[in-house]
Amino acid sequence: MSESAPALARPSKPPRHGQEAPVVPDEVIVEQILVRVPAAATVRFQAVCRAWRDALASDHFVQAYEAVRAAATKPPEIVFFAPTAAGSTAFYSSRLNDPTTHEKNGSSPAAARELVTVGNLRARDVVLSGTKPCRGLTLLFQPRENVYHVCNLSTGEHVSLPPCSPAWREITDGPYVLSSAGLGFVPAAGEHVVVRLFEDLSKRQQRCEVFGLRSGGGWRPCAGQAPPHSAKGLDGCPPVFLDGRFYWYIDSSRTNPAAGLHQQQEEAITPERILSLSVATEEFEWVPAPEERARNVLRLVELDGALCAVVDARLSMELFELWTRTGPASWSLSIRISLATLPQPARSDLGRGIRMLPLGTSSSGYGRKTILLLGTSRNQVYAYDPRSNTAGRVFSVEDFVDDAPGEGGLMLSVALHEESVASVRHRAAAAGTLEMKLGSSTVARRRGAAAGGQRRNDDLDITPQLIQQMLGAAMDQFHNIINMYYYD
């Protein structure tokens, strides 16, 4: 551990019957008992005394807490959000049933627990940045307000970042913007950082800025200069953070909903299609994309500690591929899902939705099969077994709430959840502006939920943003067809 656990105060009450009371060692209390209580409870326990507060807020305790959960073999937890009364937004988590039994199960878990409720946050104006937390913390983005929040959804602690420089956007009322922000961690400083790559609104220059949660002080310019045209291919989606580096997929030659006609005509080509930034040196470098599918990659994700490129051609070719980076300039095809070979209803279910991203993998133990968890923009999670080429739905937001979010504007409305006691480490001057309250309720799976958790046609919310998403997806699929047939 990086530091020892702070000593806890000893009871001063004299022992009964003249016998010394047994003393539990400090390390047992911290590393064997308190590390197993729910994260929200540790917030309340910090009020017991100063010694408990220091022990539960230490880096040593955070690391011990994470180690206990990393060693557990429980199925993954899914986090999702939904609107509540008076325009507030509630975040929930639900532990999946054993995904390896999806062929027999095919249903959401029995219940979901309320994590936090945010009184002044609209569910329609929130983006979960990424498919999993970064060391226990989650970055929330409000596109219309251009505001970022870093939250621990387990404890309710959060910080609202100061206003950032405006980025260029062609569509004024929508999430698409020539900007992308992600949450990372600097081990040497023990600090979470938010890095934002964008095209400046006034000068149309490529810029990158950094905000440190522990150091504070507002947004500052990145030490390294953002490369030319690096923000031209952004659409607001966050980068991937892995092993001390951020990764953006940059395809400035491909039409995207954030790009105007003049930009499409310019076709400012970058040296490579993946841009990387080191959080230690704050220097940029270009990374080659998979040569076989360089023109077809739609997203980058982190999957089981590896950088993966997502090729999503479900709408045009019923094809979904994951390419894993195996070296500085080498990639290998790790998973190929041909929807045409899947049995129904999996074939139809996985073909729906604007986007589908891998969340992670799940295994039921030694020698058992490993299942790929796929989240969709229709608020659902599917378990795919590569060995048997079968898939089944294991989670749907609509099994728990009536007013589920519509198709995600930028990312998914579901992600993996990690129970954590990590602190946002903010200064008093940078307190959060969200009206966040710890949850205390449990939501049971609704009876009579629609099969597959699918929204009825008459519930479809047709908005300008949805039309923008559909047009963007159609253009992506058109380019996929052209590239696969004429460039392979």
Image (tube, rainbow, N blue to C red):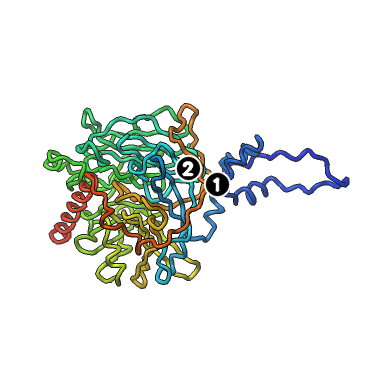
Residue 190 in view in this figure: no
Question: In the picture shown, does residue 407 fall above or below 485?
Answer: above
The amino acid type of the residue labelled 2 equals Asn
Q: Residue at x 19, y 53 (%)?
A: 476
First in sequence: mark 1 or mark 2?
Answer: 1
Q: Residue at x 19, y 37 (%)?
A: 170
Residue 363 is left or right of residue 354, and the answer is right
Quadrant location of the N terminus in the rendered image: top right
Of residues 353 and 246, the one drawn nearer to the viewer in this rendering: 353
The amino acid type of the residue labelled 1 equals Ala
Residue 129 is left or right of residue 229, and the answer is right
Q: Which corner quadrant of the image does residue 103 belong to?
A: bottom left
Residue 6 is left or right of residue 386, and the answer is right
Residue where numbered disc 2 is placed: 152
Residue 238 spot, x, y in % from top left: 33, 44
Q: Which corner quadrant of the image does residue 399 belong to?
A: bottom left
Q: Do the CB atoms of the residues marked 1 and 2 lie less than 8 Å apart?
A: yes
Residue where numbered disc 1 is placed: 39
